[in-house]
Amino acid sequence: MKTKLALFFLLLLGNGPSFGQFSQIGSPFITHFSKSDYQAGTQNWDILEDPRGILYFGNNKGLLEFDGVRWRLLSTPNRTIVRSMRLAADGRIYIGAQDEFGYLEADSTGLPAYRSLTGLVPEEYRGFEDVWKILSFGPHQLFCTQRALFALRDGEVETLLPEGRFDNYFQANERLFLRDTRRGLLEFDGRTLSPVPGGQLFVGQGIAAILPGPGERLLLVSMNDGLFWLDRQGIEPWDAAANDFLREYRAFCGLALADGRYAIGTPLNGLLIVDQAGRPSLHLNKATGLQNNTVLSIYQDHLQNLWLGLDNGIDYAEICAPFKLVHSRTGLEGTGYASILYQDRLFLGTNQGLYYFDWKERGDPLKPMRLQEVGQAKGQVWSLQELGGELLIGHHEGAFVLRGEEAVPLSRVQGAWKFLELSSFPGYAVCGTYSGLLLYRRDPQWTFVRRLDGFGESARVMEQDAEGNLWVSHAYKGLYRVRFAADEPAIAGVDFYNSGNGLPTDLFINVGKVRGKLVFTTPEGLYRYDPSEDRFFPDAELTEVFGEGRNVHRLLEDQSGQVWFSIDEEFGVVKVREEGLFNELEVHYFNQIQDVLVDGFESVFAVDSHHVFIATEGGFVHYDPSIEKDPDIPFGALIREVAVLSKDQRTVWAGGLYQN
């Protein structure tokens, strides 16, 4: 598994999203559950969630129950494949297997137990094979097999037989359809079967799904020939952009999503999500993170994310989360450290080198984003900055500038951390290195001038104040203020600050800039510098936002003015709604990615209001701020077992079933 089950429990019961614009960059977080995790069969044919958030899976070895932490397997009396499930209006969960159907009820301890209804079927029809679907239609529960349709009402079962075989069943907009292999597509009104106008088209080809569409129209997903529209007048092909993909890779199942899109599972190439215009919106397959390419079932949970029953395993795809992954599956190698948009290309720097892709070519899910590597930049990239119209690269091997398709050395002084243009000396910039500061001049391109004498410490984290001084933090010593001469870019003096100057400690002091003002982060809160007293004091305004005495690792202001924080074990962003420092704001916490950040090297780049890139241990996370969580979804907790703690421990109550 890719993530811990404890985290997964929070995902099941946490807040869901309100829908925004869906990003096409990267792939969603996908959690894998293999047969070794759930200890049952490979294939998973149907998925159901009860109102408590408990999930059920129709599996080759029976019925799987998952509460976010534990799996339980329940077998039918004949121990056959569970193909279908249905949560009825009265809260009862019906189960369909091979030559068997029934429902769940709790035993005396609250464990789910299976109760068979097969005895209600006339004996001559009991060899009905698989129950492929269970549908609620009017007062009936319908158990759908290829040999017959069984309608349960008030403890009695009626039987409807096909002319050929009932190949599949569909329910949409309170209409019920059946595909008869001899008659094509039929509609069932509860008593009789009537041919659908144009339905003979499907005598010889299968139908994967019929889904609610706009108005009274229904979307018909054929197994081999793409998409069709179905209404009262008949069936017509839909000239949709997704058709070529569906004809090549086939369709097996489908689901109408809460936001109006359609999810289609294929047997050959994973999952395709299609928008209301028929265009591919998202494609997930083995190459982008699924365990395999055969999707047998799809379910959208209360968080609007997708559970996928696969030919071998179960996957949970967080399609509605604001985060997507940009990692090795896109051609990116290594741990992320820096990102920037430069000349319509997104550049991503890692400990393995520098990569890019054309920003304007993003967006087609059927043409996966593949990153290209920049020549001559292999190895550790520390920073990416645009200064004077050029892309400067901080690298373990020194400072580089991008010229064409390659990185060209500016200096071979080892270890270039970061560049800053000198406000007091236009046309000049300094670069912090492993062992001091280097001076560069732009005329018209950046060139190396000399090493600046007078300061020899590592200068990874540095900022410039309003007077043009450089503030450089050292994780194990304290702070340095580097003052420049009045008439030339040369160091005039260096002042050292530590706990003797008002800071709470000498260790792990960082300097950042928020709203044009310097902010000093410490293990014991946020501080500001008072030049009139030449001392540091707690920053009252920021302390009101982030809390007093907290271990603040970093504050980063992105290109859109939002302030990112890494504090204690929390990571998130402060969204400032008005001009000024913090007049009106909202705070968002992203603890889901806290554990994958690169400690001490947090990096955030905002392209625009839909595209923010966050460096992580596995590459980068793409964040879309327009996809926000819904605060109205309540947090829930489940009591799953009550036991007597004694020498002979016994379960008094084992979780129960949902009761309407």
Image: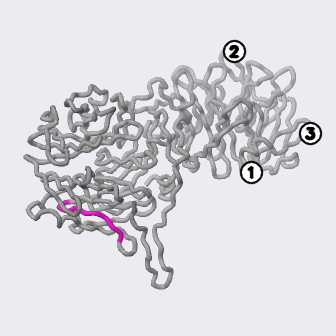
Q: Earlier in the sequence, mark 3 or mark 1?
A: 1
Residue 402 coordinates in the image, percent (x, y): 57, 24
Q: Is residue 414 visible in the rendered structure shown here?
A: no
The crowd level at tag 1 (other Cα within 10 Å; few <14, some 14-19, many 20+) is some
Q: Amino acid at mark 1?
A: Pro
Residue at the spot 80% in from the left edge and 49% down from the top edge: 506
The crowd level at tag 2 (other Cα within 10 Å; few <14, some 14-19, many 20+) is few
Q: Which residue is mark 2?
A: 443
Q: Which residue is mark 1?
A: 523
Residue 590 coordinates in the image, percent (x, y): 58, 46
Q: Amino acid at mark 2?
A: Asp
Q: Verify CB contact (< 8 Å) between mark 2 and mark 3.
A: no
Q: Is residue 104 magenta?
A: yes
Residue at the spot 14% in from the left edge and 40% down from the top edge: 194
Q: Which mark is residue 533?
A: 3
Residue 71 coordinates in the image, percent (x, y): 39, 63
Which of the two marks, 2 or 3, is nearer to us in this view?
3
Q: Which quadrant would the N terminus be assigned to in this image?
A: bottom left
Q: Earlier in the sequence, mark 2 or mark 3?
A: 2
Residue at the spot 28% in from the left edge and 35% down from the top edge: 218
Which of the two marks, 1 or 2, is nearer to us in this view?
1
Real-space Cα distance between discs 2 and 3? 40 Å
Q: Earlier in the sequence, mark 1 or mark 2?
A: 2
Q: How is the image coloured?
A: one colour
The residue range painted magenta reads 98-106
User: Where on the picture, by quarter, is residue 445?
Assistant: top right
Q: Amino acid at mark 3?
A: Glu
The crowd level at tag 3 (other Cα within 10 Å; few <14, some 14-19, many 20+) is few
Q: Observer-nearest residue: 549 or 221? A: 221
Prevailing SS of the magenta stretch? strand
